[in-house]
Image (tube, helix red, strand yellow):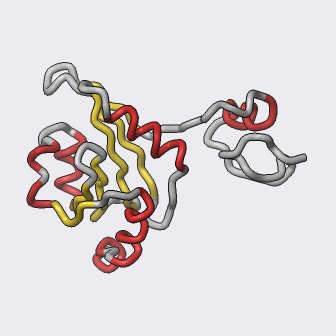
Amino acid sequence: MKTKHPQFDFDINEKKYYSSELNQFIAESCRTDMVVNDIDLIIRYYKDDDKIRIIECKHLNEKFGIGQFLLLEDLQKRKDINTFILFGDYPFNFSYLYVFANKSIYLMDKEKLKLFVDNKLKTNKLNSCFIAKIEKRNDIYNYLKSHNKCSDTQ
């Protein structure tokens, strides 16, 4: 039996990774016009800049779905939310941060990433980490594939 959900395009009887049992239930049983997204990290700061930071994390060789990208892009349009995709592998000695607000990629070392997650390094202060402006979604992968400094330095 094939699932009807476009984001879950595989035979249901196949062994397939689901991020939750609810996602499996949705793929097998629910409406096909829904988009299911699983976001890794949502941080709410009450004392800092009073913005929500939403960070999706991907391994350096991992792609993300169009639905997830579009959701993060839409959420970025709100004035109280900043959205990001972090490309890296534990222990995150080096990683790439894609910032939806300005469609740019930044190279982060472990210490800068810690400061960023702790909200001690604001998005507008990332200039020293800037490496590329990326306008199209697919160009993110093309850039990371051809300029992957992380794997060279770990």
**Left/right of residue 34 with respect to residue 109 in the rendered view:** right
Q: Is residue 22 above or below residue 6?
A: above
Q: Is residue 152 above or below residue 8?
A: below
Q: Is residue 109 above or below residue 32?
A: below
Give the mark count.
0
**Left/right of residue 30 with respect to residue 153 in the rendered view:** right
Q: Residue at x 14, y 26 (%)?
A: 48
- Residue placed most toward the observer, 6 or 17: 6
Image quadrant where residue 91 sits: bottom left
Q: Quadrant of the C terminus?
A: bottom left
Where residue 19 appears, x then y in whole percent?
Answer: 61, 42
**Left/right of residue 61 with respect to residue 51 in the rendered view:** right
- Residue placed most toward the observer, 22 or 123: 123
Q: Residue at x 51, y 59 (%)?
A: 63
Image quadrant where residue 37 sits: top right
Where residue 113 appears, x then y in whole percent?
Answer: 23, 51
